[in-house]
Amino acid sequence: MDAITLVAAHTALLVVDVQEKLLPAMPTAEAPRLLRAVDLLLDAADRFGLPTWVTEQYPSGLGATVPELRARLETRARRPPVLAKTIFSATGVPEVPTALAASGARSVIVTGVEAHVCVFQTARDLARRGYHVHVPFDAVASRDPACKQAALALLASHGVTITTTETVVFDLLGDAASPHFRALSKLVRALPG
């Protein structure tokens, strides 16, 4: 498997800090797109059985994961763990690298906020650990769009694949004959433009 190809059997999803007090600070135009993209990626993760983890940065101060995503997490057959952290990189939570190693994943899709802090440090650290990291630009946000762009450019220059939610979903599908094609392609079409 190469660094740019996602194969469901070897891919995991990490949702970083999409929390009650962080999401409202994101640009008005980006927050709904991010929520829809992360929800779609959680749906795809359910369908393909991707190992999934969710983190919350300092939840006593920044709140829990936003209700829209919490509702999605609660409906999953295999409810992903929600891990509290104070360190910015999700790899600093011992359960994340341990569970990733045990899962057999070689690629990790990283989503969340803020793109230039927790998402950046998580993606960087996963790449340093040898994972193929994919960051969908439409599934991450920063308060300042320039900070998001700078973080994505820096990650790309160091081998992280900057992609789109749609590209991730269709890469996981691989074939229109997939039993998940119809449902997921409908959800992709519903993403805000």
Image (spheres, grey):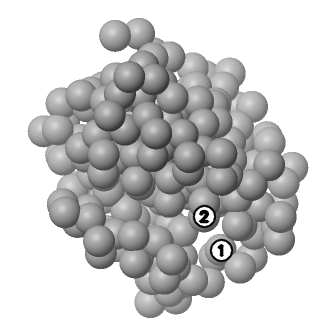
**Point 24% across, 28% down: residue:** 9
Number of the front mark, 1 or 2: 2
Which amino acid type is marked by label 1? Leu
Label 2 packing within 10 angstroms: few (<14), some (14-19), many (20+): many
Cβ atoms at labels 1 and 2 below 8 Å apart: yes
Whether residue 2 is visible: yes
Cα–Cα span, label 1 and label 2: 9 Å
The picture places residue 110, in percent across and down from the top left corner, at: 49, 45
Which amino acid type is marked by label 2? Leu
In front of the other: 14 or 167: 167
Q: Quadrant of residue 189?
A: top right
The disc label shown at residue 35, or none: 2
- Residue 189 vs 141, above or below: the answer is above
- Residue 169 vs 20, above or below: the answer is above
**Point 32% across, 56% down: residue:** 53
Q: Quadrant of residue 48?
A: top left
